[in-house]
Image: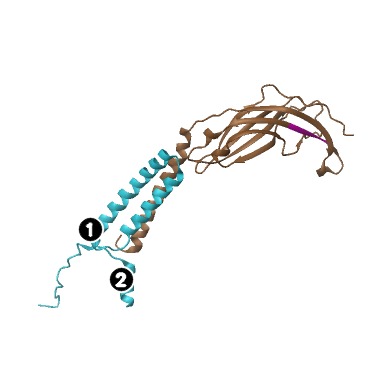
Amino acid sequence: MHTLYARVNNVTALLSSCMMVLLAAIALSSFIFTADPKGQLAITNVQVVPGNARRYGHRQQDFAFVNFNVSADLSPLFNWNTKQLFLYVSAEYTNKKGVTNEVVIWDRIVRRKEDAKISLAGRNKYNFRELSASFRDVPPAHYSLKYNVMPHVGVLTYGEAARTVEPVLFPAQRQLS
Amino acid sequence: MLEYIQKVFEGKIDFEGQNLVEQIVRITLFAATVVSFLLGFALQSLQVTFGAFSVVTVALFLVVLPPWPMYNRYPVQWLPAQDTKAK
């Protein structure tokens, strides 16, 4: 502590310890906020259309097109330690082989509290395909609206805001004229 | 000239000054941590937390790092040199 450099060393050492304590306290404070907002997710239309699977040359492949309505007020999830929300709609079904699949068909990043009130009619952003190339005889799927809360400091938390009450059937393949 | 620059950058303070600096640094940093957390939590803003913490830190650097006269009030009193060659 007798010279300038010794003082710089001493002060910054204690400063970094205090900063760590501060960051840990902020991370832990996230657990106080236990908002669990719920919304609605309604599937309005599902269509199954054949197409070319680009990855495998000219193999025929079914594509599902899902239209849905989402309404949810997720603004309670924004607290002082929330950086952004990642919202996604996923389809959950168990295929013929008994494998449980979860396919993300739509997502959105919400950066501001003002944008956290979601009310939209959307359709899948990402190709929705079955691994076996066909949706024939695939059991009905549940759809759910889920979110990740991304904090500035701390742990990523998951949650589910909405879920279809009844599983939704995959219709028969529609022939394109 | 070079000696003067060296002295400025060395910034020596006496033993009482070192004790004082230690106390100031401890109390200020601990208090800043607690107060900035509570302030940010109350206002629900991380910007307030880190703003307050960094303002206090910069102020602390200004108070503690330069060899202000208040840290040199008790210079060490050396005993007079003894003439060992006598006798």
Mark sitting on residue A32: none
> Which chain is depicted cyan?
B
Write down the colour of chain A: brown
Identity of the residue drawn at 64% across and 26% down: A163
Q: Is residue A159 above or below residue B76?
A: above
Q: What is the quadrant of residue A137 in the picture?
A: top right
Q: What is the quadrant of residue A46 in the picture?
A: top right
Q: Are marks 1 and 2 in contact (CB under 8 Å)?
A: no
Residue at numbered disc 1: B16
Disc 1 versus disc 2: distance between alpha carbons? 19 Å
Q: Amino acid at mark 2?
A: Lys
Asked whether, in this view, residue B54 is left or right of residue B80, the answer is right
Residue at numbered disc 2: B7
Q: Is residue A3 visible?
A: yes
Indicate the position of residue A153 as horizontal and vertical percent values.
49, 43
Whether discs 1 and 2 lie on one chain: the answer is yes
* Span shown in magenta: A61-66
Assign the magenta stretch its main secondary structure.
strand
Q: Nearer the viewer, residue A163 or A16?
A: A163
Q: Nearer the viewer, residue A169 or A27?
A: A169
Q: Is residue A94 visible?
A: no
Disc 1 crowd rating (10 Å Cα; few below 14, some 14-19, many 20+) is some
Q: Which quadrant, please, contains the N terminus of chain A?
A: bottom left
Disc 2 crowd rating (10 Å Cα; few below 14, some 14-19, many 20+) is few
Residue extending farthest left = B87
Indicate the position of residue A4 as horizontal and vertical percent values.
33, 63
Asked whether, in this view, residue A30 is left or right of residue B16, the answer is right
